[in-house]
Amino acid sequence: MTEKIQFDVVVVGAGMAGSTAAAIAAREGLQVAVIERGQKPGAKNYFGGALYTHALEEIYPDFFDRKPPLERPVTETGFWFLSNDGLVKATVQGGYIDNDPVDAYVALRAEFDLWWAEQAAAEGAFFIPKTLVTDFLYEDGQVIGVKTDRPQGDVYAPVVIVCEGVNNMLTQKLGLIDHDLRISKTALAVKQLISLPPKEINARLGLPDTKHGMAISVVGDVSMGMPGLGFLYTTTSALSIGVGVTLDALQETQIKPYNLLQRYLEHPAIAPLVKDGQLMEYGAHLIPEGGWTTLPKLYTAGAMVAGDAASMVNAIHWEGTNMAITAGKQAALTAVEAHKQQDFSAKSLSKYQDRLKETFVLKDLKQYRKMSAFLSNHPEFMDIYPAFLNDALGLFFTGFGKPKRKLYKRIFRSLTNRRPLFKAVGDLIAFGRAVIGI
Amino acid sequence: MSKKQTDNKRELPQVYVDDMLMSLKYFTDEQELHLSIIDPAVCQACEDQPCIDFCPVGAYRPQDGRTVQIAVQSCVECGTCRVLCPYLNVSWKNPRGGYGVSYKFG
């Protein structure tokens, strides 16, 4: 019998939540092991996407002095509404988003997550990559560690923080949620990272230099009427461009995800942006968009769960990484307190939930709890309204030399031909209710 | 009526997904498959075989008529098949530590 491997805290998964939890717990003096199944932290992670400064600085106040591997700052952001053959842009630059540092930075996860893990390692956390956690170790119904796929791979700790990502098999094993991912509340996102010379990116998107970048949500024709969104982000020398749709819609339409993405790339307004670009990487990832409605119980005796594994995603605001960071931190602080009290019971770890209630994480997830159902029930926001918006503006700016009363009638008709007016009003009210959460 | 009000859909292009998979890096586990079909007969009887369509890397392929085969080495571990197979006929687990897809950029 070999000696028991014992830590104060075991973290499962070295993503945003995991490496954050590890950093905070290690900083507070605990012995922390982070077990990551990938070749290295970040190897399994794939997102749009942008990271949010508020969360990064909350963990490392000197974040920017540490030279993080970020891509372009987001200096222009908003919505692009695609019709079948047109595009209406509603983006913002300057004004409220002209901050130093800016509020969001485009990032690539393979590089960033590795760096984020290195920061945690510098705090004293011990990383164990290429190792899969397969199950938990229990004593008297309390989690006391994890089993891994390594020979003699049991790792003991009185607190396990599960940050395993969207495929939350371990969270299910703990009994924190009694079902697998719901297909109506999970989106599959596919993305291409398309390499282009930085100058070309700047010219095509009207960015002055590589210190300017875009984060765009694309609504409409991109999802072919399915509940879903497209996106476009600028890295320094590539466009990160993809589309996510809910699994139930994918099942119903039998559309191949990569064909959907290709169709988006061939849209007359998008094709010129990616022309002659080289594919650097294609990938796919699930997004747990259920938020509050698929939130597991967040703790049990000896374990807590954070990040995608706990469905901490606000699909409308593209938030997830920041929720993971905040939740990872709160889980770690709870673990620190539990060690001080030497109490790892469910009651002790329930303080994690109390702490999270005080943050934007649970407040927002609760407020937006009706959003995923709303989007499933109101596909017209992905289809009819973006198309109408294109018609309305298109007609407005081609009405020269014609009686304007007729013009407005045509615009009005282009709405009512698609959706009766009372229904359109109802849709708006429903949207408002889903956002406000009443 | 102008064409703008018909919302006629652009056609769906057909992509050869294997070309895109060339951009991915994998550490293939030669000993153990993390993904398998539980009962091949269920796939034979499955009318739509939606896995052939929804898998984002096209790992599910028709073979000799109604047999479905999985090109496990193409899998990016997204998890879609586990929950979207109408008969939940997929045995899905994470690859062993270190194996499977390894995103270079993410």
Image (cartoon, helix red, strand yellow):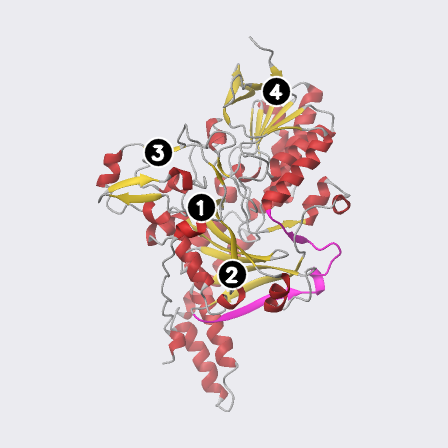
Q: CB of mark 4 within 8 Å of CB of mark 1?
A: no
Q: Is residue A352 left or right of residue A80?
A: right
Asked if residue A293 shows in the view, the reply is: yes
Which residue is disc 4 drawn over?
A158
The disc labelled 4 sits on which kind of residue?
Pro
Q: Which quadrant of the view contains residue A299?
A: top right
Which residue is disc 3 drawn over?
B36
Q: Is residue A51 left or right of residue B30?
A: right
Which numbered dot is residue A218? 2
Q: What subunit carries mark 2?
A: A
The quarter of the rendered structure image containing the N terminus of chain A is: top right
Q: Nearer the viewer, residue A393 or A194?
A: A194
Do tags 4 and 1 sit on the same chain? yes
Q: Position of residue B28 (x, y in %)?
A: 45, 35
Q: Position of residue A336 (x, y in %)?
A: 69, 26
Do tags 1 and 3 sit on the same chain? no
Which residue is disc 1 drawn over?
A185
Asked if residue A358 shows in the view, the reply is: no
User: Residue most toward the bottom?
Assistant: A401
Badge 3 element: strand
The disc labelled 1 sits on which kind of residue?
Lys
Q: CB of mark 3 within 8 Å of CB of mark 4?
A: no
Q: CA distance from mark 1 to mark 3?
A: 25 Å
**Numbered disc in front, either 3 or 2:** 3
